[in-house]
């Protein structure tokens, strides 16, 4: 076996940035991701064992029976380690030393919509989700005054605000700037569309043509954090939809379509059949970075043209070595099979040492095998030909 050492210019370390697209549809308190509905399995109603519109972390327990599921566990011992979901008091009182503490899979996540109404004088509980974004919103204020938590354009602490949260296990490192696209439908017809055309986080109403308040800013996007805040409160049911009765976008009462009601039914507690005529689309691209190593293996002219494969030698030769108590001698006159191509059966083509490269083995500095790269089709290697095999490993 021939060994060659990688040179400094044969190994490259790169970071590849990918932007996968995501398409959420919300209708009748159900969420659909990338047009994928429930897929019935042998043991569960949905093979992923998560609701539609959700992403399964690790994708464990795919179509497993209830008594055969994978689950995380730890043992209570002197290290006092446990799961984050177990409080200190519960850990001390409910588990004896040596007891097994278990969790459950799958873990899943999806978009969540929260509506904060200005009519509530003191917003507590989930309102902390909005108040906790105060410093983050003010940080991005140099991009646009619409980011300001409180300013000349309004006070998000007291006005109607629609907050759509996107979990990071979906978008990755960040949401790609300028990729967010929101659509508001009534009876399947588009009545409003928002886009960040200027890539500054402002969601501007761009359609349909001639729609109410076209060109107005209806909210902002926090790309790194994964939040969409909508404050647009103009009535979108105008023109042909002026007679639309409205729906229970906040649970009650019946209201006209507005951007602050976008995404009603997306894990916000609104019961099915409360929003039956309106549907919503949320499109964006995520950002995922992958580290890669590219390696170049060179087969120069005159290299790798010998093989220890028995088929390399001419057939029907006596290849049995001579052995004795003091010697082991192989025949020095074995001939190599000539497989050079000839256009005629006689005379045959001149002899040419030929091998076929089918794989490249990668070793560490101690010659421990750490990887094998195989080519799709063996490469014909003659003494006059040279090749460079490019290998890429995603980390």
Image: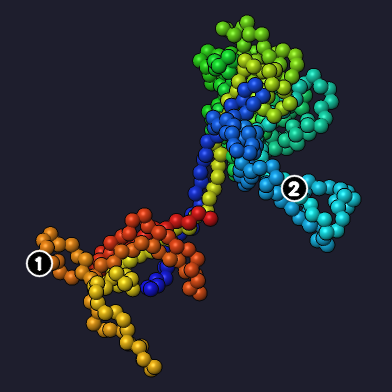
Please identify the residue farthest to the bottom as the structure is shown.
326
Q: Secondary structure at mark 2?
A: loop
Quadrant in the rendering for residue 347: bottom left
**Which residue is labeled 1 in the image?**
347
Residue 219 showing in the rendered view: no
* Disc 2 crowd, CA 10 A, few/some/many (<14, 14-19, 20+): few
Quadrant placement of the N terminus = bottom left
Instruction: Identify the residue position indicated by label 2 in the image.
Output: 103
What residue is shown at x 28% (from left), y 70% (from top)? 312
Q: Is residue 172 left or right of residue 97?
A: left
Residue 323 x %, y %: 35, 88
Percent across and percent down for residue 222 are 64, 35
**Quarter of the rendering containing residue 188:** top right
x, y percentage for residue 129? 75, 34
Residue 87 drawn at (x, y percent): 84, 47
Q: Disc 1 vs disc 2: Cβ atoms closer than 8 Å?
A: no
Query: Residue at point 25% right, 67% down?
Result: 354
Q: Residue furthest right?
A: 93
- In the displayed structure, 76 sits above or below 29; it is below
């Amino acid at each position: 076996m021939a060994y060659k050492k990688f040179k400094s210019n044969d190994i490259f370390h790169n970071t590849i940035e990918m932007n996968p697209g995501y398409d959420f549809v919300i209708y009748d308190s159900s969420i659909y991701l990338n047009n994928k509905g429930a897929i019935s399995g042998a043991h569960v109603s949905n093979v992923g064992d998560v609701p539609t519109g959700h992403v399964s972390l690790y994708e464990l327990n795919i179509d497993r029976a209830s008594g055969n599921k994978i689950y995380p566990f730890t043992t209570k011992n002197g290290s006092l380690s446990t799961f984050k979901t177990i409080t200190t008091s519960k850990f001390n009182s409910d588990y004896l030393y040596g007891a097994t503490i278990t969790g459950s899979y799958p873990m899943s996540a999806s978009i969540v919509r929260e509506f904060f109404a200005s009519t509530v004088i003191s917003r507590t509980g989930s309102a902390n989700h909005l108040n906790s974004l105060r410093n983050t919103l003010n940080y991005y204020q140099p991009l646009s005054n619409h980011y300001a938590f409180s300013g000349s354009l309004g006070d998000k602490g007291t006005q109607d605000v629609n907050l759509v949260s996107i979990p990071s296990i979906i978008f990755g490192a960040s949401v790609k700037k300028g990729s967010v696209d929101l659509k508001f439908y009534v009876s399947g017809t588009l009545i409003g569309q928002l886009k960040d055309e200027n890539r500054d986080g402002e969601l501007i109403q761009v359609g349909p043509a001639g729609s109410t308040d076209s060109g107005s800013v209806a909210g902002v996007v926090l790309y790194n954090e994964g939040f969409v805040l909508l404050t647009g409160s103009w009535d979108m049911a105008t023109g042909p939809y002026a007679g639309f009765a409205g729906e229970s976008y906040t649970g009650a009462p019946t209201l006209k379509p507005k951007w602050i009601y976008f995404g009603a039914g997306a894990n916000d507690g609104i019961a099915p059949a409360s929003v039956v005529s309106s549907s919503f689309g949320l499109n964006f691209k995520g950002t995922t970075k992958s580290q890669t190593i590219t390696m170049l293996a060179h087969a120069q002219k005159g290299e790798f043209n010998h093989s220890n494969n028995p088929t390399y030698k001419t057939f029907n030769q006596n290849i049995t070595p001579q052995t004795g108590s003091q010697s082991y001698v192989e025949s020095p006159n074995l001939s190599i099979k000539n497989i050079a191509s000839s256009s005629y059966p006689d005379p045959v083509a001149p002899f040419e040492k030929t091998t076929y490269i089918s794989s490249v083995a990668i070793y560490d500095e101690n010659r421990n095998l750490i990887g094998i790269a195989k080519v799709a089709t063996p490469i014909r290697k003659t003494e006059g030909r040279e090749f460079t095999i490019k290998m890429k490993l995603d980390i």
